[in-house]
Image (tube, rainbow, N blue to C red):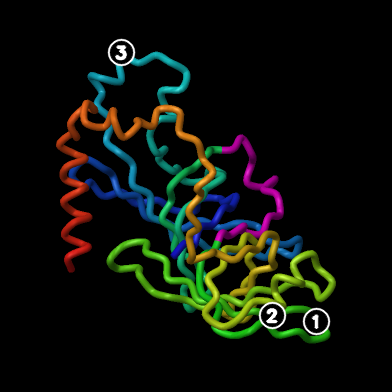
Amino acid sequence: MIANVTAIVYVLSVSEENLNNVVLQKGTAISRIDSDDGFQIYKYFNYVPIRDVSHDSDDTSPDADTEIVQPLNEEAVYLISGKFSPNQDSSLNVMVTTSICLPIDKEDIPICQPIVHLLGKTLNNAELSETGYNLNVQVKPYLSKDYFNPFTIALTHPSNGRFHNALTKAKKNSTIHTTGILFSIKNNFYCEIMEFQFIATKQEANTNVVVPWKLEDTEKSTSQPKSTLEKRIALIQQNQSTQ
C-alpha cells in the first residue's frame, strides 16, 4: 500500500550514523500549516549515499549533485517527499526519498498543508451528512521493519464536489487511490480529497493491438533462442502454474 507525503519543512535537528555505504540522518522538522503559529511535526529518516571523492572530483557537470539523495542541514528549508506513517501524538514518521533545498528564510516559510498520496482499502460505505462525504480508508505503508503499522484516515469531500458520484459508489473493501490535503485534529487524521479513483483488480486483454515485429508461424522455427533471463522467467512461470 502507498502512503506518500509532500511538504515544505524547516529542519530543527539532525543526527548522523554511518551504515555501510550510506549515512543515516535522523531528526525533526516542522511545517507551517496556518496563520496562527500552527505547525506539523515530522520525524524523518534520510539515507544519504557516501560519495566516492576520487570519482566525484572528475565530475564537473552542473547536474552532478542531483543524482544522489541530498543531505539535510539544520535551520534550512526543504521541499521533501517520502513514505510516511502517523504517530499517536499526531507527528509523522517520514522516510525521505527526495529533497530540494529552498532559498527561503525561516520567517518566510509559506503556509502549506501536507499533500498526501494514499492507496488503501475502504472500511465502510461513504457516509453523507450535512458536512459532506466521509469515507474511512485503511492504509498499510512500509517504511522499514520498525515502521510497518496500518493506519486509518478519514477522507472528506463536499456533498456537491466533483467526486460525489464516485464516493456514492464506494463500497466496503474497495481499493482506492486518492490525493489530498492532510489535516490533523485531536490526534486524528483527515484528508480533503483532491483526486479520487478506484483501482481495478480485473485485467482485460487487448486483442486489437497490431505488433509489427510479430513473426508468422512459419518463421518461428528460425527465431533466435531465448536468453538465460527469459528461460529463468519461463521456469518460474512453470513452477507457479504447477503449484
Q: Secondary structure at mark 2?
A: strand
Q: In the rendered structure, are the residues bearing label 2 and label 1 in contact, judged by CB atoms less than 8 Å apart?
A: yes
Q: Which mark is residue 131?
A: 1
Kindly state the secondary structure of the residue where label 3 is placed.
Answer: loop
Q: Is residue 103 on the magenta stretch? A: yes
The residue under label 3 is which amino acid type? Answer: Asp
The residue pinned by badge 3 equals: 58
Q: Secondary structure at mark 1?
A: loop
Q: Is residue 47 above or below residue 39?
A: above
Tell me residue 65's x, y (percent).
42, 27
**149 and 20: which one is in front?**
149
Q: Quadrant of residue 108?
A: top right
Q: Residue at x 45, y 33 (%)?
A: 211
Q: Which mark is residue 134?
A: 2
Magenta stretch, residue numbers? 102-117
Q: Residue furthest front?
A: 218
Dot 2 or dot 3, earlier in sequence: 3
Task: Estimate the x, y position of residue 155 in percent, counting from the top left.
Answer: 65, 73
